[in-house]
Amino acid sequence: MVGIISYGAYIPFYRIKAEEIAKAHSKDASFIKRELLIEEKSVPGCDEDSLTMGFEATLNALRRANIKTDEVGAIYSGSESPAYAVKPNASIIGEALGITNYTSADLQFACKAGTAGMQACFGLAKSGFVKYGIAIGSDTSQAAPGDILEYTASAGAASFIIGNSKAEEIAELEGMHSVSTDTPDFWRRGMQRYPRHAERFTGEPAYFRHVIECSRQLMKKSKTTPKEIKHVALHTPNGKFPSRAGKILGFDEEQLESNFIVSKIGNTYSAASILALTDILDRAKPGEKILLASFGSGAGSDSFLFKATNNIKKLKPARTTRHFIENKEHIDYAKYCKITGVTR
């Protein structure tokens, strides 16, 4: 038995509306909102980065459960915007939490680096090499001024404590599957400030191909139909992609509800699909099945099937994902440029 013991989320306080970004570039905000289904996005403060957000999300995960930090044997932090070019977020988070004698690493696979860390922790916990592992997905994503990505690239983090104790698991792992290919839909060379993308190419041969195939294969392996799944968390580069992919897979809007948080916070990259998972876990009931499917440009997808257990009712109160979404302050484009370092 292996599964999720606890979880935590973190989303910055600042937001910028799509209209504010469009006004700065003399663009039509209504067109952007209609095409991307993005109303606003989160913006990291001047003292926030993937490291601090990953730490905050992990603290929220620890507050929910009775976990002794000296029993944590692994920390994996997934991000494409680490605090240092050469120095891991994971070991700094471990030090700040007072954890010792653990294995750690920073992982990078665009927006699926967080789920890659979850896979590593599931493997270590299932094998018995560690009692608990912490998997984090955290990003302060960047986009060139005026690029379509500027309307979506945002910031946030999610953290999961993973273990092999049936008495503690709130969501049992029933299966996982991955698909990887060399599909160059999004990339950034060394020393380049902003990433580049292949526009529409990022949809059909990249996102849809991987997310749909990976999810279908997982359901086939686990002999599970879409109707048996109560909640679905897909990667959210915008509002349209997960909605379309979900419908192709046979899910309705009620099952996909948590994916729509993207319209209020934007694309949090490595945290995107797993932030939707935290929102699901905030309201999931025992016995409900959950499908999670991440996507990372380059390209690949990780899919997981979970089943909520009775232990989910025993978690201690903590700040929910919706709390972070609703707790916000809107800023103008000038302040956005100042605190993020964006230059037109």
Image: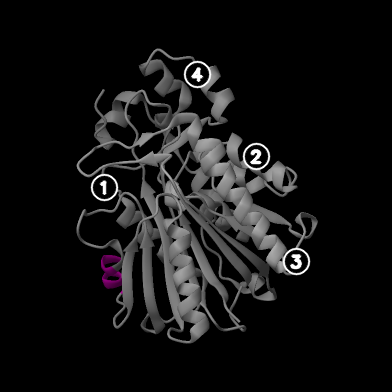
> Could you say whether the residue bearing mark 4 is in a helix, strand or loop?
helix
CA separation in Å, label 2 and label 3? 23 Å
Q: Disc 3 designates what residue?
A: 223
Q: How is the image coloured?
A: one colour
Pick whichever of labels 3 and 1 is earlier in the sequence. Answer: 1
Q: Nearer the viewer, mark 2 or mark 3?
A: 3
Tag of residue 29 = 4
Marks 2/4 in contact by CB < 8 Å: the verdict is no
Tell me, yes or no, whether the highlighted magenta stretch contains residue 96: yes
Q: Is residue 312 left or right of residue 229?
A: left
Q: Which of label 1 and label 2 is nearer to you?
A: 2
* Separation of residues labelled 1 and 2 (CA atoms): 34 Å
Name the quadrant containing residue 142: top left
Residue 47 marker: 1
- The kind of residue tagged 3 is Lys
Quarter where residue 226 is shown: bottom right
Label 1 element class: loop
Image quadrant for the N terminus?
bottom right
Please give the residue where the numbered disc 2 appears in the rendered image: 243
